[in-house]
Image (cartoon, rainbow, N blue to C red):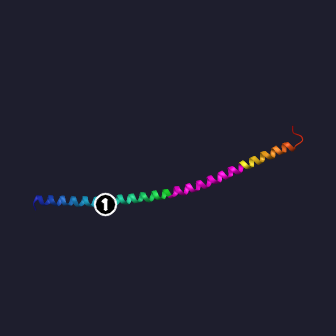
Amino acid sequence: MDTWVWVVIVVAAIVVLAMILFAVSGRMRKRRIEKRRVEARDLRQEASTGFGRAKERQALADEQADRAKQERVSAQQAAERAHEVDPDTD
């Protein structure tokens, strides 16, 4: 065979290999992107769940703080009343 035939074969083989590599890299890139999308969706869901739990805990903490304030006021009122009632205090 002539040299030019070998050159054409080699060039054609290189073009075919480049096309195959391009197609494979495109598929790999799509898989990678899809994997990252799934991971991001899972992280968003986890964050949403965490925000919900945090909100519930904050509401509970606020409720307990309100109850503590009410108990403190009641205790203060009881102490003042006891002071008024007690004949031994000045």
Residue drawn at (74%, 49%) of the image: 71
- Which image quarter: residue 85? top right
* Residue found at x 45% / y 56%: 40
Q: Specify whether residue 61 is painted magenta.
A: yes
Q: Residue at x 58, y 56 (%)?
A: 53
Image: magenta residue range: 45-68
Magenta span: chief secondary structure: helix
Q: Quadrant of residue 20?
A: bottom left
Q: Residue furthest left?
A: 2
The answer to whether 53 appears left or right of 82 in the picture is: left
Describe residue 29's horizontal placement relative to residue 46 as left or right: left
Q: What residue type is labelled 1?
A: Val
| Label 1 crowd bin: few (<14), some (14–19), many (20+), radius 10 Å | few
21 left or right, relative to 41: left
Residue 74, x across and y down, in percent: 77, 48
Quick one: quadrant of the C terminus?
Answer: top right
Q: What kind of element bears circle 1?
A: helix
Instruction: Out of 79 and 23, give the one closest to the viewer.
Output: 79
Residue at mark 1: 24
